[in-house]
Image (cartoon, rainbow, N blue to C red):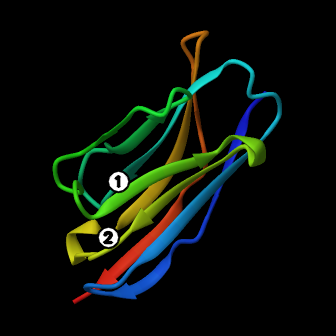
Amino acid sequence: QVQPVESGGGLVQSGGSLRLSCTASGSLSSIYAMGWSRQAPGKQRELVARITIGGSTNYADSVKGRFTISRDSAKNTVYLQMDSLKPEDTAVYYCTMDSIRGYIYWGKGTQVTVSS
Protein backbone atom coordinates (compact mmCIF):
# COMPACT_ATOMS: atom_id res chain seq x y z
CA GLN A 1 0.00 0.00 0.00
CA VAL A 2 1.35 3.42 -1.00
CA GLN A 3 0.56 6.35 1.29
CA PRO A 4 1.71 9.81 0.18
CA VAL A 5 2.26 12.37 2.94
CA GLU A 6 2.51 16.07 2.13
CA SER A 7 4.32 18.81 4.04
CA GLY A 8 5.39 22.41 3.53
CA GLY A 9 2.09 24.23 3.24
CA GLY A 10 1.39 27.45 5.08
CA LEU A 11 0.57 31.12 4.84
CA VAL A 12 2.56 33.37 2.52
CA GLN A 13 2.14 36.84 1.08
CA SER A 14 1.40 37.44 -2.56
CA GLY A 15 4.63 37.22 -4.56
CA GLY A 16 6.22 34.88 -2.06
CA SER A 17 7.40 31.29 -2.38
CA LEU A 18 6.73 27.92 -0.78
CA ARG A 19 8.06 24.45 -1.38
CA LEU A 20 5.83 21.45 -0.88
CA SER A 21 7.25 18.01 -0.28
CA CYS A 22 5.63 14.60 -0.53
CA THR A 23 7.13 11.38 0.67
CA ALA A 24 5.58 7.96 0.50
CA SER A 25 5.69 4.85 2.58
CA GLY A 26 5.36 1.42 1.05
CA SER A 27 6.75 0.00 -2.16
CA LEU A 28 6.80 2.43 -5.07
CA SER A 29 7.74 -0.18 -7.65
CA SER A 30 4.35 0.21 -9.37
CA ILE A 31 4.43 4.04 -9.45
CA TYR A 32 5.11 5.60 -12.85
CA ALA A 33 4.16 9.21 -12.19
CA MET A 34 3.83 11.62 -9.29
CA GLY A 35 1.98 14.87 -9.18
CA TRP A 36 0.25 17.65 -7.35
CA SER A 37 -3.39 18.62 -7.57
CA ARG A 38 -5.24 21.34 -5.72
CA GLN A 39 -8.76 22.25 -4.71
CA ALA A 40 -9.87 25.73 -3.81
CA PRO A 41 -13.08 26.39 -1.88
CA GLY A 42 -16.10 26.03 -4.15
CA LYS A 43 -14.00 24.84 -7.08
CA GLN A 44 -13.24 21.52 -8.68
CA ARG A 45 -10.00 19.76 -7.98
CA GLU A 46 -7.42 20.42 -10.70
CA LEU A 47 -4.08 18.97 -11.72
CA VAL A 48 -1.27 21.42 -11.04
CA ALA A 49 1.85 19.52 -12.10
CA ARG A 50 2.97 16.00 -12.85
CA ILE A 51 6.28 14.24 -13.39
CA THR A 52 6.88 10.75 -14.75
CA ILE A 53 9.63 8.34 -13.73
CA GLY A 54 11.30 9.29 -17.01
CA GLY A 55 11.39 12.93 -15.93
CA SER A 56 8.72 14.30 -18.28
CA THR A 57 6.71 17.10 -16.74
CA ASN A 58 3.48 18.89 -17.44
CA TYR A 59 1.84 21.86 -15.76
CA ALA A 60 -1.49 23.59 -15.62
CA ASP A 61 -1.45 26.75 -17.73
CA SER A 62 -2.19 28.81 -14.64
CA VAL A 63 1.12 27.85 -12.98
CA LYS A 64 3.51 27.56 -15.92
CA GLY A 65 6.62 29.61 -15.35
CA ARG A 66 5.92 29.94 -11.62
CA PHE A 67 5.81 26.36 -10.28
CA THR A 68 8.42 23.64 -10.70
CA ILE A 69 7.92 19.96 -9.96
CA SER A 70 10.88 17.71 -9.24
CA ARG A 71 11.59 14.37 -7.62
CA ASP A 72 14.25 12.55 -5.67
CA SER A 73 13.84 8.87 -6.44
CA ALA A 74 16.35 7.83 -3.78
CA LYS A 75 14.19 9.53 -1.14
CA ASN A 76 10.81 8.55 -2.64
CA THR A 77 10.02 12.26 -2.59
CA VAL A 78 8.39 14.68 -5.00
CA TYR A 79 8.59 18.45 -4.60
CA LEU A 80 6.61 21.42 -5.82
CA GLN A 81 8.48 24.71 -5.79
CA MET A 82 5.96 27.53 -5.97
CA ASP A 83 7.20 31.02 -6.76
CA SER A 84 5.42 34.30 -7.46
CA LEU A 85 2.42 33.04 -5.57
CA LYS A 86 -0.95 34.70 -6.11
CA PRO A 87 -4.07 34.76 -3.93
CA GLU A 88 -5.77 32.53 -6.50
CA ASP A 89 -3.22 29.81 -5.70
CA THR A 90 -4.87 29.42 -2.30
CA ALA A 91 -6.08 25.84 -2.03
CA VAL A 92 -5.51 22.49 -0.43
CA TYR A 93 -2.69 20.81 -2.33
CA TYR A 94 -2.70 17.05 -2.72
CA CYS A 95 0.12 14.75 -3.67
CA THR A 96 -0.78 11.98 -6.11
CA MET A 97 1.03 8.86 -7.23
CA ASP A 98 -0.09 6.97 -10.32
CA SER A 99 0.23 3.22 -10.36
CA ILE A 100 0.70 1.07 -13.46
CA ARG A 101 -2.20 -0.93 -12.10
CA GLY A 102 -4.51 1.97 -12.88
CA TYR A 103 -4.90 3.28 -9.34
CA ILE A 104 -4.05 6.76 -8.08
CA TYR A 105 -2.91 7.17 -4.51
CA TRP A 106 -3.79 10.46 -2.82
CA GLY A 107 -2.32 12.19 0.19
CA LYS A 108 -4.50 13.94 2.75
CA GLY A 109 -3.51 17.39 1.55
CA THR A 110 -1.74 20.45 2.84
CA GLN A 111 -3.21 23.95 3.00
CA VAL A 112 -1.59 26.78 1.07
CA THR A 113 -2.91 30.26 1.74
CA VAL A 114 -1.68 33.30 -0.18
CA SER A 115 -2.63 36.66 1.26
CA SER A 116 -2.97 39.76 -0.89
Q: Quadrant of residue 40?
A: bottom left
Q: What quarter of the picture does the C terminus occupy?
A: bottom left
Q: Is residue 28 left or right of residue 102?
A: right
| Residue that lies at the very extreme toward the top in this rendered image | 101
Count of marks, rendered view: 2
| Residue that lies at the very extreme toward the right in this rendered image | 26
Q: Is residue 30 left or right of residue 58?
A: right
Q: Which mark is residue 68?
A: none
Pick the front one: 114 or 21 = 21
Q: Which residue is mark 1?
A: 39
What residue is drawn where x is 22% and y is 54%? 64
Q: What quarter of the picture does the N terminus occupy?
A: top right
Residue 11 horizontal/vertical position (percent): 44, 84
Q: Residues within 10 Å of mark 2 (few under 14, many from 20)?
A: many
Kind of element beneath mark 2: loop
Q: Which residue is mark 2?
A: 90
Mark 1 residue type = Gln
Tell me the CA gap for discs 2 and 1.
9 Å
Residue 63 horizontal/vertical position (percent): 24, 57
Mark 2 residue type = Thr
